[in-house]
Amino acid sequence: MPHNTLPLYAITVLIWGSTWYVIKLQLGVVAPEVSVAYRFALAAVLLMAWCIVKGKDMRYAARDHVWMAIQGLFLFSANYAVFYVATGILTTGLIAVVFSTIVGWNILLGRIFFNTPVTMQMVLGALCGIGGLALVFWPEVSNLDLRDEGAYGLILCIIATVLASIGNMASARNQKRGLPVLQVNAYGMAYGAAFTALYAWANGMTFNWDGSAPYISSLLYLSVFGSIIAFGTYLTLLGRIGAGQAAYATVLFPVVALSLSVWLEGYVFTPAAFGGAAMVLAGNILVLAKPSHFKWLKPS
């Protein structure tokens, strides 16, 4: 990994490792979808203001705006709306573990959209990750029933992760077209906020407000750090080294999220859950490690 990418990884891991718990502070008074709309509307306004102050070009063709809107729909709207709902069901550390499987989804979708090669090493890593998830959620998996909250939360997290991966593909496409990360994120977050607000309005949700310190502080943290800064660093990595390698950050932030979950939510590891989380992380490492480290997987 080039040395100039290490700070980008560190920022992404530390911020996103903590945002999963901070999202929990958004739940209660305001509907999850409305909170997502508030988060990305605020982030879009701040980021656009920054771009204007810095003299960034904000004029783009209609076709580019279509792709910015697609990125916004999948990366700054639909996936978070689903994740916020899941956060009311599962502990945040477990949600981070499920989201870390975006490594495999990025590689699969990268193959579909960009014809990126898929190796046996990647396949084995993905299978290891799937097996690990099964262990982490074994009580829900062994008696799968959509009426069970744990199983429902798991399914929501998987859906949200796939949506986020599609958003990653849209971002990769935009960067391949030479569109700058900051401006695309500003427009994408604006579109994402608009899509989420429209969905909330269509479903009769109230656009109310929570004036408590935890809600306001968590909204500011998620908008500035979790959205503007972390997405800026992550998507810069994605454009620089590819979706699969950029997703290496997701190998590490579940460690941060699980640590916070144990400390703040009282999550207790069972032996199966501990082994499963280790398998998910090991699978991600296997997927993203240099092929030269696993020469035994190559056909002779």
Image: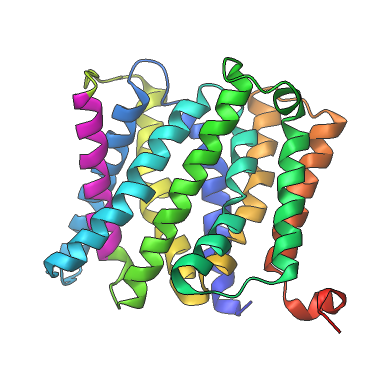
257 vs 207: above or below: below
The residue depicted at 26 percent of the width and 62 percent of the height is 67
Q: Position of residue 293 (x, y in %)?
A: 81, 76
Position of the C terminus, as image quadrant, is: bottom right
Prevailing secondary structure class for the magenta stretch in the rendered image:
helix
Up the image or down, 192 lies above or below 203; here it is below
Can residue 295 be seen here?
yes
Left or right of 281? Residue 64 is left
From this view, report whether residue 268 is shown above or below residue 288: above
- In the figure, is residue 266 to the left or right of 29? right
Q: Which residues are magenta?
A: 183-202
The quarter of the displayed image where residue 197 is located: top left
Residue 245: name its quadrant: bottom right
Vertical placement of residue 27 versus 182, above or below: above
For the point 72% across and 50% down, the residue is 129
**Residue at the image point whose x is 57% and y is 15% from the top:** 147
Answer with left or right where residue 50 lies relative to residue 36: left
Q: Residue at x 33, y 67 (%)?
A: 181
Count of marks, rendered view: 0
Relative to 223, 191 lies left or right: left
> In which quadrant of the rendered image does the N terminus lie?
bottom right
As rendered, which of 40 and 264 lies closer to the eye? Answer: 40
Whether 200 is among the magenta residues is yes
Between 185 and 6, the one lying in front of the other is 185
Can you give x and y, in whole percent of width and height, for residue 135 in the image? 78, 36
- Residue 4 rendering spot, x and y as whole percentages: 55, 77
